[in-house]
């Protein structure tokens, strides 16, 4: 088979479409013939040598895919060869074939084509696990999303609205904010021109956000705490703004607030399977009925992954950038 390899870490040109050995499914695993994968910021970090795959997982980038089951490993039940699926991966999505633990498989939801389904596993799993399973966003509460036009952001806007929450987003252009508004966002903040803490206070009569989903990290830590409501929950899922920040514990304590920080890739198989099961139960019906829809910015040939990485780096996309083996 062919896969995107990284012979030496570096810029987008470090991604090389090369022939590699076919993977073989082991106990509890399935082999998927990949139709499409999606580009995530973790892939950019891996390409640069900053985010190595966990031990024992595929060396190739790609944290999600869609395709058809080609073979079942020992001990797998409930799936059949030929089933159309999408999957949450630890790596290996940028390839023609990938091995997946059966607990991380999802059926393609109704109303979604097989290529587009590649945009769903990582974003739905990240949003559902952090916003709902950990931060427990409830109807009537306010959610603040940084990067509202991203793949994570566009999914989070829709899921939060579906459960009856009010949604505030930050984005870097009026065009991106307009797209967020189309998806249901209530409070639109241009982070290049406005202070999100002040704008959120104005829009919530000084209350702030009950839940914040943050992809920035250290750069926003102090301001995120200021933006939290009493009993607020800050969920940090990215470090685009650095890894070390100063935290005012007194401010956190006065608000009786909580901060969590998670990654999805390195979680144990059992935890990932539980998240995928929750996504299938709670999110898949919303997608199948059209209340929540995947947002895809563009689809590119997998062999052109370098150009897709440049596009993600440029930041002019809305939603997901997909790579397909069939283009």
Image (cartoon, rainbow, N blue to C red):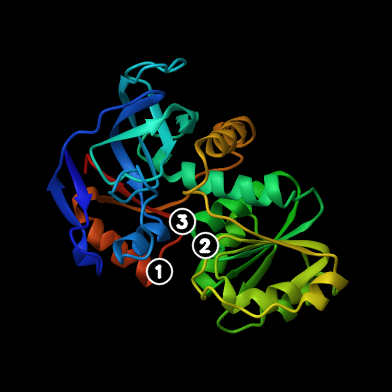
Q: SS class of the residue under badge 2?
A: loop
Q: Quadrant of residue 259?
A: bottom right
Q: Residue 54 or 207: which is nearer the viewer?
A: 54
Report if the CB atoms under discs 3 and 2 are less than 8 Å apart: yes
Residue sitting at 64 percent across and 51 percent down? 130
Can you see residue 161?
A: no
First of labels 2, 1 by sequence position: 2
Residue sitting at 79 percent across and 62 percent down? 232
Q: SS class of the residue under badge 3?
A: loop
Q: Residue 37 or 233: which is nearer the viewer?
A: 233
Q: SS class of the residue under badge 1?
A: loop
Q: In which quarter of the image is the N terminus?
A: top left
First of labels 3, 2 by sequence position: 2
Residue sitting at 65 percent across and 75 percent down? 221
Q: Quadrant of residue 35?
A: top left
Report if the CB atoms under discs 2 and 1 are less than 8 Å apart: no
Q: Residue 123 or 241: which is nearer the viewer?
A: 241
Q: How far apart are marks 2 and 1 (CA)?
A: 9 Å
| Residue 210, position as x, y percentages in the image | 78, 61
Identify the disc placed on residue 149: 2
Q: Is residue 59 left or right of residue 205?
A: left
Q: Residues within 10 Å of mark 2 (few under 14, many from 20)?
A: many
Q: Residue 74 or 136: which is nearer the viewer?
A: 74
Q: Residues within 10 Å of mark 3 (few under 14, many from 20)?
A: many
Q: How far apart are marks 3 and 2 (CA)?
A: 6 Å
Q: Quadrant of residue 327?
A: top left
Residue tagged 3: 319
């Amino acid at each position: 088979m062919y896969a995107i390899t990284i012979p030496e870490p570096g810029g987008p040109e470090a991604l090389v479409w090369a022939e590699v050995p076919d993977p073989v499914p082991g106990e509890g695993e399935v082999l998927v013939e990949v139709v499409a994968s999606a580009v995530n910021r973790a892939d950019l970090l891996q390409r640069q040598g900053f985010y190595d795959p966990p031990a024992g997982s595929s060396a190739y980038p790609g944290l999600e895919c869609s395709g058809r089951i080609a073979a079942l490993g020992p001990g797998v039940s409930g799936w059949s060869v030929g089933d159309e699926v999408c999957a949450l991966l630890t790596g290996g999505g940028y390839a023609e074939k990938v091995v997946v633990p059966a607990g991380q498989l999802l059926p393609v939801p109704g109303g979604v084509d097989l290529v587009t389904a590649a945009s769903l596993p990582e974003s739905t799993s990240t949003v559902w696990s952090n916003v709902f399973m950990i931060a427990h966003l409830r109807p009537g509460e306010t959610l603040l999303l940084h990067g509202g036009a991203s793949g994570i952001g566009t999914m989070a806007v829709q899921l939060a609205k579906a459960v009856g929450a009010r949604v505030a987003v930050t984005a870097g252009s009026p065009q991106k904010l307009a797209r967020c508004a189309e998806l249901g966002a209530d409070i639109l903040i241009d982070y290049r021109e406005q202070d999100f803490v002040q704008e959120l206070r104005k829009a919530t009569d000084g209350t702030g956000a009950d839940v914040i989903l943050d992809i920035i990290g250290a750069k926003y830590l102090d301001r995120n705490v200021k933006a939290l409501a009493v009993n607020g929950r800050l969920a940090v899922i990215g470090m685009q703004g650095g890894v070390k920040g100063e935290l005012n514990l007194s401010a956190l304590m006065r608000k009786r607030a909580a901060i969590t920080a998670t990654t999805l890739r390195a979680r144990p198989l059992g935890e990932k399977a539980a998240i995928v099961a929750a996504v299938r139960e709670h999110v898949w019906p919303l997608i199948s009925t059209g209340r929540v829809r995947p947002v895809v910015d563009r689809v590119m040939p997998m062999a052109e992954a370098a150009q897709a990485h440049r596009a993600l780096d440029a930041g002019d996309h809305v939603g997901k950038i997909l790579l397909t083996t069939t283009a």
